[in-house]
């Protein structure tokens, strides 16, 4: 069974909400990425989303754009990201999704990349700029490889398109709770409950909500409506401030642990 599907099945059995953490691969270097992945597993993270550095990350706000830049500067390539995933796999079964732009798949060869990702231990791909309507071959190859194609739903997505996306859903559906790009926010969107209810009318696939969640209180608030929450920029910002400091892994994983504990109080 795919590790994402297995993790959400376990969460449902325990009546728990999931925690998805996003970081930029290779920020500040790939060894740090490996160490953070293992520390996140120990801290209670359910799924790790690894951003594959790209020169034109149009869906990302400044925090994640700078992380992509640092990843490129550290020599991170898609192939080296897969090597890092394979290294994590030797010690951890933490589900891993690659957050990636289509051009990177196209350059390698979409089917070839999917095959190599599965071999390395990747569990799903979230291709930011690939519309589901144009992804028949991609979806078929993902199914053959046992990977989950993760699709996005936005506040502006009309009902008919929500239904179309939901029919293709596997692993989880990612609800982008705000219009625009990624980034930390002081408040959570007031439309999350309405939108997740609309999505659930079309699918029983788990729904993860992200874009803007940056602290434990927001995590708890959003988790009332979602099966999982996604936190990215708030983690990436801490990585940026700590850089190659010896405190990087313990401090960032400590923050992540506080989010996990907020979702699953003792």
Image (cartoon, rainbow, N blue to C red):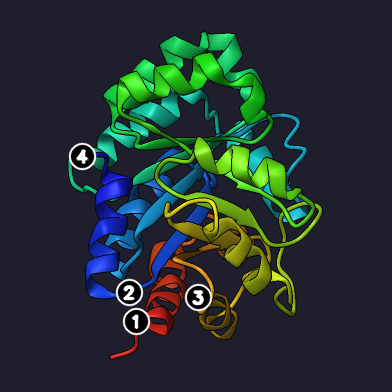
Residue at (51, 38) in percent of width and height: 167
* Label located before the other in sequence (3 or 2): 2
State how far apart marks 3 and 2 are (Cα): 10 Å
- The image quarter containing residue 40 is bottom left
The numbered dot on residue 1 is: 4
Marks 2,4: beta carbons within 8 A: no
* Label located before the other in sequence (2 or 1): 2
Q: Say which residue label 3 marks.
A: 223
Please tell me whether mark 4 sits on a helix, a strand or a loop.
Answer: loop
Q: Say which residue label 1 marks.
A: 264
- The image quarter containing residue 80 is top left
Residue at (41, 49) in percent of width and height: 32
Residue at (50, 24) in percent of width and height: 78
Marks 3,1: beta carbons within 8 A: no
Quadrant position of the C terminus in the picture: bottom left
* Label located before the other in sequence (3 or 1): 3
């Amino acid at each position: 069974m795919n590790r994402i599907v297995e993790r959400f099945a376990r969460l449902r059995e325990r009546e728990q909400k999931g925690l998805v953490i996003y970081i930029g691969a290779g920020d500040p270097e790939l060894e740090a990425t490996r160490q953070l992945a293992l520390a996140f597993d120990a801290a209670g993270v359910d799924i790790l989303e690894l951003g594959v550095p790209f020169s034109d990350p149009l869906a990302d706000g400044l925090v994640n754009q700078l992380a992509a830049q640092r990843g490129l500067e550290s020599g991170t390539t898609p192939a080296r990201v897969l090597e890092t995933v394979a290294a994590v796999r030797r010690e951890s079964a933490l589900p891993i999704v690659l957050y990636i732009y289509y051009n990177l798949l196209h350059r390698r060869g979409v089917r070839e990349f999917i095959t190599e990702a599965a071999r390395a231990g990747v569990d799903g791909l979230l291709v930011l700029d690939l519309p589901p309507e144009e992804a028949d071959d991609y979806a078929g190859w993902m199914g053959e490889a046992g990977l989950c194609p993760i699709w996005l739903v936005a506040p502006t997505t009309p009902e008919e398109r929500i239904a179309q996306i939901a029919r293709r859903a596997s692993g989880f559906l990612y609800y982008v709770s705000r219009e625009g790009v990624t980034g930390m926010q002081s408040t959570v969107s007031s439309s999350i409950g309405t939108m997740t209810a609309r999505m659930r009318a079309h699918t029983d696939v788990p729904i993860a909500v992200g874009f803007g969640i940056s602290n434990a209180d927001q995590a708890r608030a959003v988790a009332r409506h979602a099966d999982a929450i996604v936190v990215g920029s708030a983690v990436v910002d801490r990585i940026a401030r700590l850089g190659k400091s010896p405190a990087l892994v313990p401090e960032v994983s400590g923050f992540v642990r506080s989010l996990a504990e907020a979702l699953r109080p003792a």
